[in-house]
Image: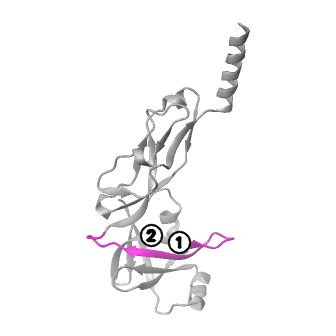
Amino acid sequence: MKTILLKGEMRSEVGSRTAKELRNAGQVPCNLYGAGENVHFAVYQADFKNLVYTENVYKVRLELGEKTYEATLQDLQFHPVSEAILHADFLAIQADKPVTVEIPVRIVGNSPGVRAGGKLVKKINRLRVRGMISNLPDYIDVSISTLEIGQSTKVGQLEVTGFELLDAPANAIATVKTTRALMQAAAEEAKAAKKS
C-alpha cells in the first residue's frame, strides 16, 4: 500500500471554539486514536487534496512535531453546503493488529457481453477489507472476462488471500446490462422473423 505524508501541528486546546478558529485559519482539526493516547492536531485543508480527492487508498505518515505515526484515515466530516472538510479521524497502525479500510476496485478483462453490445455498469467502487496493513493491495482486481449480458460479478466470487472482504457476498460489483438499442434490435429481429 502506498504511503502519503501529512504534516500537522499539535493542538493543546480542544472544543468547538478552538475548532472554529482552526477552520477560519484554513486548518482541519484532527484526532489520532490507537497510539496509546489520543493525539489532537491540525492539518491545513489543502494538504488533504491528494489523500481524499482520489480513487487511491493510502497509508498515512503523520509528522506531528518531533513524532511520526503510521495511520489510516478512518472518518471525515464535511460541511453540508461548502463541502469543506470539518474534521478528520485517524487510526494508528500497529504491526500486530489488523486494520479495516476501503480498497478501490479495478475492472480487468474484456466482457463478451459488452462486445455483443451490452453496457458495463460498475456498482461498487471500493470494497471494505480487514487485514494486516502489509497484506493490503493498492487495488482489488475484478475480472469481467466471462460476463455475458445480464450477468454480474459478486463479492462472494472474488478470491483474495491475506485479508478478508467485509462486504456482503451477494453484492454485485459489476454488471453487464442490455442497452435500449440492443432491445430495439432484438424486437425488430423478432418482428422480421414473424413476417417471414
* Looking at the image, residue 27 lies above or below residue 125: below
Q: Amino acid at mark 2?
A: Leu
Q: Residue at x 64, y 32 (%)?
A: 179
Q: Amino acid at mark 1?
A: Leu
Q: Residue at x 59, y 81 (%)?
A: 23
> Which segment is the magenta one?
76-97
Query: Which mark, residue 179?
Result: none
Q: Percent position (x, y) of residue 114? A: 54, 31
User: Which type of secondary structure does the marked residue at label 2 adopt?
Assistant: strand
Q: Residue at x 41, y 48 (%)?
A: 156
* Looking at the image, residue 102 lies above or below residue 69: above
Residue 156 visible to the viewer = yes
How has the structure been colored for display?
one colour
How far is disc 2 from disc 1 in space, using C-alphas?
8 Å
User: Which type of secondary structure does the marked residue at label 1 adopt?
Assistant: strand
Task: Give the class, few, some or many, for how many residues have Cα within 10 Å of label 2's Cα (few <14, many ≥20).
Answer: some
